[in-house]
Image (cartoon, rainbow, N blue to C red):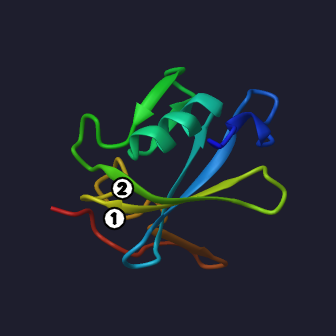
Amino acid sequence: MPFDASTLKYDANGLIPCITQDHATGEVLMLAWMNADAVAQTLVSGRVTYWSRSRQAFWIKGETSGHVQMLLELRIDCDRDSLLAIVAQTGPACHTNHTSCFYTLINDSGETILSKPVA
């Protein structure tokens, strides 16, 4: 029986957070949002599809940049209110051309950029 995306717990806007992790390195690449249709589309196509809150439209990762995320596993947390997408990432995941969106360290001394954008 196919997975029913409506069984997940979405917020008031019909969205669920999705953490994306690189299968090869284990690095957390990004966090984005999905609605039920984006979850279903991701499972059918194998290409990770998010919901863009700013554009109010589907966003297939890599559609314009070529930095594609191919889905290897999609996991649900114990409360069914967040997702973990384990992906094969092509190129940088961040729109700033960093490998990961989480490239800034913060502590009581301030902020430190940990990596340079991919050339």
Of labels 2 and 1, earlier in sequence is 2
Please tell me which residue is depicted at 22% across the width and 63% down the height of the picture.
Answer: 118
Question: How many badges with numbers are in the image?
Answer: 2
| Pick the front one: 82 or 54 | 82
Compared to 94, does 62 lie above or below?
A: above
Compared to 116, does 31 lie above or below?
A: above
> Quarter holding the C terminus?
bottom left
> Label 1: few (<14), some or many (≥20) within 10 Å?
many
Numbered circle sitting on residue 93: 2
Q: Quadrant of residue 25?
A: bottom left
* Type of the residue with mark 2: Ala
Q: In screen coordinates, is 76 left or right of 111?
A: right
Q: Residue furthest top?
A: 56
Dot 1 corresponds to which residue? 99
Please tell me which residue is depicted at 50% across the width and 44% down the height of the picture.
Answer: 43
**Are dots 2 and 1 in contact, CB under 8 Å?**
yes
Compared to 100, does 42 lie above or below?
A: above
Q: Secondary structure at mark 2?
A: loop
Please tell me which residue is depicted at 30% across the width and 43% down the height of the picture.
Answer: 62
- Label 2 and label 1: CA atoms lie apart by 5 Å
**Position in image of residue 1 (x %, y %):** 65, 43
Q: In screen coordinates, is 8 left or right of 58?
A: right
